[in-house]
Image (spheres, grey):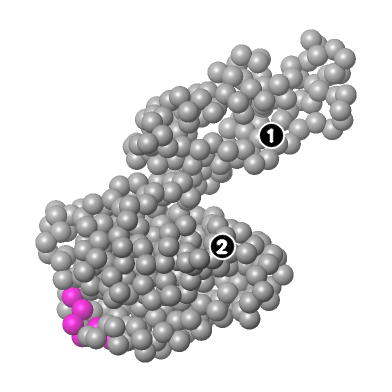
Amino acid sequence: MDISRHLMRYQDELIAFRRDFHQHPELGMQEFRTAEKVADYLNACGMEVARMNVTGVVGLLRGEHPGPTLLLRADMDALPIQEENEIPHKSVNDGVMHACGHDAHTAMLMVAAKILAGAKETLKGNIKFVFEPNEENVGALAMIKEGVMENPRVDACMGLHIWNQIDTGKVGITPGPVMAGMEHFDLTIKGRGGHTAAPQSAVDPILAAAAVIQGVQVIQTREIDVQKEPALIMFGKIQGGTASNVIPDSVTLSGTLRYLFDGPAESPDNPKKRLERVVSHICAAHRTEYILDFLYGHPALVNHPEMTDLIRSVASSALSPSPEIISFVTLAGEDFSEFAARAPGVFCLVGAGKSGKKNYPHHHPCFDFDEDAMQTGTELFVRGALHFFDQAGKLNFMKKGVV
């Protein structure tokens, strides 16, 4: 198969899909238009198409020869952001914008699916093309619960993300933890209300909350080696009180915990365990009670060493033009970790920063990227998948049947 020729043939289609999705963004669990376009496209490619988690789409390509099953994944959801870019394909949906590159991911995997469908007769195994809804709120878990990893069972997985903090022409492919585990949490501190003129008669939850905000910083600056397993505990919302002269009964803090810890959940070194330990002692010292709820989240994204080596070899030797392969780790979260926790996986960060221009960060109302990066991402999907099937018999985790 002349992959380079196919990539050139579908280049305009790739860009057209991305710009169409960008112009018509949809929030998580509302990706109805996007999902319909994806499903129709996969059907036209001869896939077995299924719907999962309301707006999720899965296309199954069965190779003509027996072999393992590889999962390739793209996310489809946009963000509740008002776009400020002045471009022809600017969002037409007020307050909704593709400010993270999911429009590009969907377009890249669609075109990769079409190219790989052309290799069906020689394919030694199966490919599941997973188009995930609601990635920003861990949409992967619902798809997993609905059986996306089974029938046929997934043996390995691969995903990627365009990344503005990396220049176009570079690709981050790193073994081990590469993106943060993330937990959204609510912490309610309960005291006893009273008059601000007589604080000795009350138990002040505001003072305890202030101590918690300060105190938990010891975890990320005094307990954890920031070079090996960095962590961030950030508070984004504080609610409490009704008047300036009233001590409230309770205060609620909301925040996120991000970490690269790659150990058992029950370990006392787990950042969640550390957070609760510090909170419990601070609240006890202030004579308050607390309720700590972890609302939703996902583990750290850990790249499997063999899958990482396999894709690094493809990126460095088979892509045209050959990108510079770098190591890159970030505390941004990515729920592809749920797939990679269940099957050996690799996740790549494809540089999309525009040379000589201001590159706004992901989730910014002026976010944009170099569309040339999409060719790199699409080729990485295609060549990475084909190389996986070529090398599957040599992978130790395949020999041992580890998934």
Disc 2 from disc 1: Cα separation? 38 Å
Task: Using the image as rendered, state which of residue 153 and residue 340 is in the foreground.
Answer: 340
In the rendered image, residue 87, in percent from the top left (x then y), is placed at 63, 77
Q: Is residue 125 above or below residue 204?
A: below
Q: In the rendered view, does 201 fall on the left or right side of 136?
A: right
Label total for image:
2
Residue at disc 2, secondary structure: loop
Amino acid type, mark 1: Thr
Q: Say which label, 2 or 1, has the lower sequence index.
A: 1
In the image, the segment drawn in magenta is: 117-124
Classed neighbour count for the residue bearing mark 2: other residues with Cα under 10 Å, few (<14), some (14–19), many (≥20): few
Tell me the residue at 28%/70% (across/down): 322
> Does the residue at mark 2 contact the one at mark 1 (Cβ under 8 Å)?
no
The answer to whether any part of residue 60 appears in the image is no
Quadrant for the C terminus, please.
bottom left
- Can you tell which quarter of the image residue 115 is in? bottom left
- Can you tell which quarter of the image residue 158 is in? bottom left
Q: Is residue 85 above or below residue 81?
A: below
The stretch drawn in magenta includes residue 33: no
Amino acid type, mark 2: Lys
